[in-house]
Amino acid sequence: MAEEKKLFKVKIDNISVEVEPGTTILNAARRIGGDIVPPAMCYYSKLQGSGGKCRTCLVKVTKGSEADPRPMPKLVASCRTTVMDGMEVANITSPEVQEARKGVVEFLLLNHPLDCPVCDQAGECHLQDLSYEHGAETTRYEFKRRTFDRIDIGDKIQLHMTRCILCYRCVFTADQLTEKREHGVLGRGEVAEIGTYIHQSLDNNFIGNVIDVCPVGALTDKTFRFKNRVWFLKAVDAHRQCEDPKCCGKTVLWMRGDEVFRVTARKDKYGEVEDWICDTCRFDKKDVKDWVIEGPRNIDRHSVISQGHYVGVHKPKDTLVEVLDGRQPKLLLDIHTVSEVNRPDIDLSQIDGPAHSDDFNKK
Amino acid sequence: MGRKLLFDKAHIEGIRYYDVYRANGGYGSAEKALKSMTPDQVLDEVKKSGLRGRGGAGFPTGMKWSFIAKPEGVPRYLVCNADESEPGTFKDRYLMEFIPHLLIEGLLISSYTLGCNSCYIYIRGEYAWIPDILEQAIAEAKKNGWLGKNIQGTGFDLEIYVQRGAGAYICGEETALIESLEGKRGNPRIKPPFPAVKGLWDCPTVVNNVETLAAVVPILRIGGEEYSKYGIGKSTGTKLISACGNINKPGVYEIEMNISVEEFIYSDEYCGGIANGKRLKACIPGGSSVPILPANLLLKTAKGEQRMMTYESLSDGGFATGSMLGSGGFIVLDEDQCVVKNTLTFARFYHHESCGQCSPCREGTGWMKRVLQNIENGKGKMSDIDLLWDIQRKIEGNTICPLGDAAAWPVAAAIRHFRDEFEWHVLHPEEATKRNYGLAHYADPLVIAAPAAV
């Protein structure tokens, strides 16, 4: 099939982009990038069937398509609506969308405890970002907020339902990543909750990924709980040879000095993981010796998490040898030209690793 | 006497049973369809009849049926939505309870038209005794060769299964119903794909209301052309209305859609007027989710025309001055009823029944309920009324399924038309606990009682 695939032309906030048929409005907007990308709390590109629930990504379709230019009557969830050829979408240019989004943020925060000062997710919380961007300064809700008891699901994961916004991401993760889903949504309406029904522990090597997908602080890593604030930690890319074939072994270590505080999967600028990691990597490899460190992690988020990080630092593309015009770094200085302490007949560059006294004693 | 098409034989004793039903011309339409017509011909008749969905939305049934995808080798399903849970609506209950064979005959004809070999009746859990009636009727029909393999020697197979719901209002939404039927949590699906393409077990599915499917029987009996002569304009045929509230004769009535609302409320043939000689204050003409109308706007449209019991006339004026025919749950309020309390009752219902899948409905319905509770209990503030208006506006249209709208509309309409009463509740909290606001100006001729602009 050599014929070229027809691309759909879409205009989002008056910026044109060509995307393949079947792309959602949200992904088309992400192709453009910048501030016209609708926020998404429940959609997760790596999880099939996610999205459509939180309603923060609502946009206005001002022109349905070239063939049928009628606008869509209601605001649509951009994460689940696919584009049509000639579609025109208004996101930040539509006051109606902004108003609706403000309403959704208010609804999401209605029963949220706003305990950011003691929440481990603070600093990398999507709800926090969202409320700074779209929320009102004060709440109009004058009633008691809904609370739940904290639940330990397993010894590594803490479930704090009070903070949950019921995005269903963790349910999809458990469904699609592990062999057996043991948790789901119980109850309905306002009192719906994520639960394991009989306080079962979630025992699976990939269940730790629910921590990464959780947009709020409802699912947190117990090995990291209350250890540090995320913005004080330096994030570095690291990898290791993981025994689990399903695990990519590529992670981000959150360090302070030589201490590894926590291990997470690598997340892109939309907060979605690049690849899943196993629980052994996440919870058990907390020693810097377990890892090969690649370099600083660039975190491209506007929120507090990227403060104090290596913003704007780029790994040099040239190797040291290239920079030194082909000289090997070991030959920067020939010690024998300045000192005869070491025996000149021993070529230091031939010694594997650091030189020890043994190397010089050998005859 | 209005002409009847569904309940014309409902008075005959034992019509619930096969022998009596058959002796009175039952299964005649099915015989005609299966033996002398092709599915396309039946579809043509339904299209000609102008039959519109009786579940609430009023979408033309013939058109809905023609949308069903027909891929090779994939079964198609017909699902009968008997999850009638809207407060004020109880028409399907009577139909299934008294003439179950009418529904089964309707299902048979519809399945033949759509090419389905399995058909499900999803019935709400609270109708605990009706599945037994239906099961018995299905067994009788099967015994007499109207269900099962090779029906009446035509080579058409059909099985009907009755499935009880667990009592969730949300499962009346077609995609939630399908999820529930599949054994999952009854959360509405995100559309598209629509059920006509990917429904039950990812197969093309048509979901229709009980009354819609039953109405196919008289259409085949008298012909689509003749059926379309009943009623006015695009509101063809007859409609079951379940009337309740402060009327002399509550019950289920079959009306031809050519009578006025006034006639329906006051004539002896139907509701028989307001009970105890009181005056009419307000009415919710189509089940709890449709906008409430004050007496003056109910009987006459904003243009001063007589309001009729039709889809068009009831929605005349849009939401500003109109309502909807909806599912036909006709709730009448007399002058002693409190609109605030009524709105609170509905808000409480929608709060309880929200599935919790999408945020505006999950959080907003509870908020509306609590604010209304405050107003009702004399703790309300003037700003609460505007707050309610703002909340409902942010729920409406922003949810996955139409139940978000259903929760928002009653509140919106109550504030739109009865703002004075809300304000009175806020300003006179002491008095509001002892007496009602009464009729006030809600029945005054229209010119004086212009709806409060919000």
Image (tube, rainbow, N blue to C red):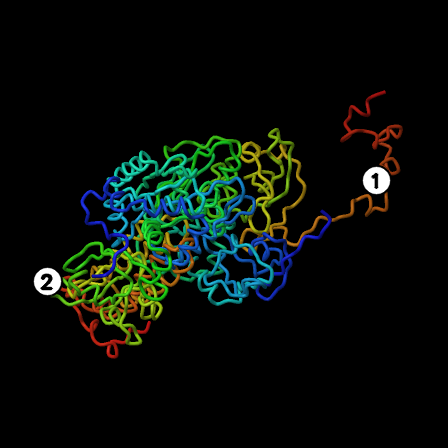
Q: Are circles 2 and 1 on residues that touch, CB within 8 Å? A: no
Give the numbered dot on residue B276.
2
Task: Check the picture and name the quadrant holding the N terminus of chain B.
Answer: bottom left
Few, some or many C-alpha atoms within 10 Å of disc 1 (few <14, some 14-19, many ≥20)?
few
Q: Left or right of B419: which side holds A115?
A: right
Nearer mark to the viewer, of 2 and 1 = 2
Q: Which residue is mark 1?
A: A328
- The chain identifier of the residue carrying mark 1 reads A
Q: Residue furthest left?
A: B276
Q: Position of residue A125 (x, y in %)?
A: 49, 50
Amino acid of disc 1:
Gln
Tell me if I can see residue B216 in this picture.
yes
Secondary structure, mark 2, is helix
Q: Position of residue A177 (x, y in %)?
A: 53, 36
Q: Which quarter of the figure has residue B306?
A: bottom left
Q: Is A167 or B438 nearer to us in this picture?
A: B438
Q: Position of residue B297 (x, y in %)?
A: 26, 71
